[in-house]
Image (spheres, rainbow, N blue to C red):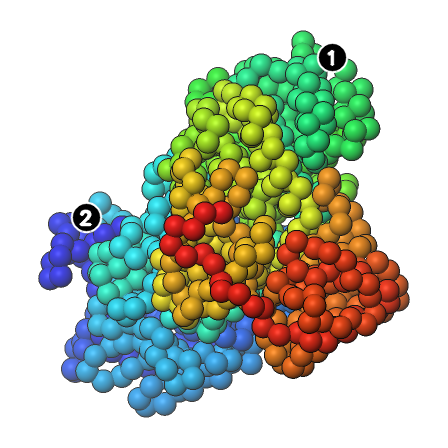
Amino acid sequence: MKFTDGYWLMREGVRAAYPAEILDSAADGTGALVVHAPVQRIRHRGDLLKGPLVTLECTAPMPDVIGVSITHFAGEKQRGPEFALAVDPSASDAGGDTGGDSGGDSGGDSGGDAGAAVTVDADEPSLTSGALTVRFRRGEEWGMDVLAGGRRLTGTRAKSTAIIDTDDGRHYVREQLDLAVDHYVYGLGERFGPLVKNGQSVDIWNADGGTASEQAYKNVPFFLTNAGYGVFVDHPGRVSFEVASEAVARTQFSVEGQSMRYFLIYGPTPKEILRKYTALTGRPARVPDWSFGLWLSTSFTTSYDEETVSGFIDGMAERDLPLSVFHFDCFWMREFQWCDFEWDPRVFPDPPGMLRRLKERGLRICLWINPYIAQRSPLFAEAKAHGYLLRRPNGDVWQWDLWQPGLAVVDFTNPEAREWYSAKLDALLEMGVDCFKTDFGERIPTDVVYFDGSDPERAHNYYTYLYNQTVFELLRKRRGEGEAVVFARSATVGAQRFPVHWGGDCESTFEAMGESLRGGLSLGLSGFGYWSHDIGGFEGTPDAGLFKRWIAFGLLSSHSRLHGSHSYRVPWLFDEESVEVLRRFTRLKMRLMPYLAEASRQAYEEGLPMMRAMALEFPDDPACTHLERQYMLGDDLLVAPVFSAGEETSYYVPAGVWTHYLTGERVDGGWGRWVRERHGFDSVPLLVRPGAVIAEGAVEDRPDYDHADDVTLRVYELPDGARVTTRVAAAAFTTTRDGAVLRAEAAAEPGRDAPGAWNLLLVNADPAALTVEGGTVAEHDQGVLVHATGHEIVVTGVTAPGGAPTGTEGEPR
């Protein structure tokens, strides 16, 4: 939201007041720093008779995190909901349970001192938490400095902080933080425009707007920068961001009301910022291994029954295409009755028997749901009678005809409504369903009354948290820790604790494929660990070229689903090569499960996304600042999807000698450079980072297997003196290099057996130059393969791989 008319003027009907100086400051009894700032200079006692007076309070909920509250009138009624925040510094190790399951009740109490040091002196009152300090300036010009290690990260100046009134009776609090010339902003949820948010106006307001507009399904009032800090605005309703837009050298954010609180989070690296942000707001839960396999859907408005479903599954099996999950979209229920949670008997006369038959084939089952009850649903009268639906201020049930005739919205602030909704789903779990696609949850009205008195504006975005929490907690209760998973479209702060999320309704175009990737990378920079998208696009029918390119992208994402709107997504409907491409990349992903499981662990234990923007992994490489057509999958795999049906593509290679995973060919990034290559539909730039050890599994037809059994450690360009630990299930492998000697050792967690069969692949090594102890050598097209005969392999004669690196201009693949 913009308030100014250029540099000098305010917009018509807008009045602003700004802190001008420090009247006084003090440390209160909770360890907070409180500063009172009048909006005019105090020249004499007469200036003490008028306001406004702005109160700023700084708190420290955990080390390296400082909360800043700006308040005009403190008498404003406290309105829920509030985000659930952790205040205990030990919460950084709390994994998926960080933030608790108490809805928003703990959000307003995230003060704490976390060992904070408050300094109150005549010149510069300050609060320090860990390495982060907030310091207020006295003197001629008001300002606040944000410091780490004596270096100014950002801060405010005269007229940065403001309380604003408008002629229509509205009141806002606004903050502006300095943004240096080479500082860039990322995050703010799943946004489909440019990855770098500089120059953008962003409203945090969930909307069902597809992937081709400025609207977003998953709005998160958190951003991180390449300047060592991130900012989380602790407001569940609408937050307006002007990122180097209204004031081009500042990041601005504002909320309507009398107060606003935001948290400054020090890294210094982007990864550390994410770790601390997710320690504060919650980390993703651990998801089951089976969820990483291929999901196949009925699609949306297509015609289907059990015969259709069985035909798809038979076709996948006949073509040797690994399939893990089958998803039934909306029309598993009768039309105009979404949701009644009852199978349509006209097309599914024997649901228990059908589910049993599908599960006998090793499949998991997913059902589509949404948080709405159509008027024709038999559940409408029941929910209305018990007060389980959102109501208008006059007591009527809130309804409209968009999406479903007479649609009403479940009120998840009512504990009985949550239990009622969960019971309907529980009956389906009892029948054999494994998980739910928790669709919708964005178009939540504001002209309503909630059971618990929540403010409708604040509850609009927050609604999706309660919706997905209700479903996820039921799955966790019934299936156990690490076995719950949803496929959610909408989200807000904290909803990362209920994975997985997918990108929503994109078109079947290469442009939408790019939109989707930007959205997923942006979401990963907003605290979400897992992300998926509809392979081939949702709206429309992709041509065979687009479908095959999207397959590679989809299977090299954290979660992979074939789903469309009015057309099926089984590959043989496109061409036979689509079948071969799907088989190749699905099998590749299954073999990569030991590696992906470790990337998943980093998501639920550390808050790092599995799919990472290049700027997150290479923050010191300025060429990565704006990269949004490629990403890192985990620590060590670079993925550059091809966004055309043609073979020619280009991508950026960071410094060092990288290796094509599929071929073993080397690409010299030098100090970092762009390369141009040609890739057929059966290929994609998939590069391994120099010095990496990639664990590859021995199974390629399913994701849920013993990842350590017969695992192969693929060693790439390991430098002298390196020591790499590779976790695989309960096993840990340590690979070291000392001069010409490379040693790999296998061990297990206490109380667990060390892995039996395992292998070592020295990619691009010369077999004639090596001596091997502890294993037998076998031929391999990418180097030297050693089958371990014990818990240690020692290879002597290791040198830097020979031959000129490839990846030169125009080289075919």
Residue 397 is at least partly visible in this image:
no
- Give the quadrant of residue 377: top right
Determine the secondary structure under disc 1: loop
Q: Nearer the viewer, residue 719 or 424?
A: 719
Q: Nearer the viewer, residue 590 or 104?
A: 590
- The type of residue carrying mark 1 is Pro
For the point 53% across and 43% down, the residue is 683
- The type of residue carrying mark 2 is Asp
Question: For mark 2, what is the residue?
Answer: 167
Q: Is residue 593 left or right of residue 758?
A: left
Q: Which mark's residue is nearer the viewer, 1 or 2?
A: 1
For the point 73% across and 52% down, the residue is 697
Q: Which of 232 and 760 is in front in this view?
A: 760
Q: Earlier in the sequence, mark 1 or mark 2?
A: 2
Question: For mark 1, what is the residue?
Answer: 349
Determine the secondary structure under disc 2: loop
Outermost residue, bottom side? 122
Q: x, y (%) of residue 332?
A: 64, 20
- Give the quadrant of residue 796: bottom right
Vertical side of 27 occupied by 8: above or below: above
Vertical side of 477 occupied by 153: above or below: below
Q: How crowded is mark 2: few (under 14 residues within 10 Å), some or many (20 or more)?
A: few
Q: x, y (%) of residue 552?
A: 54, 41
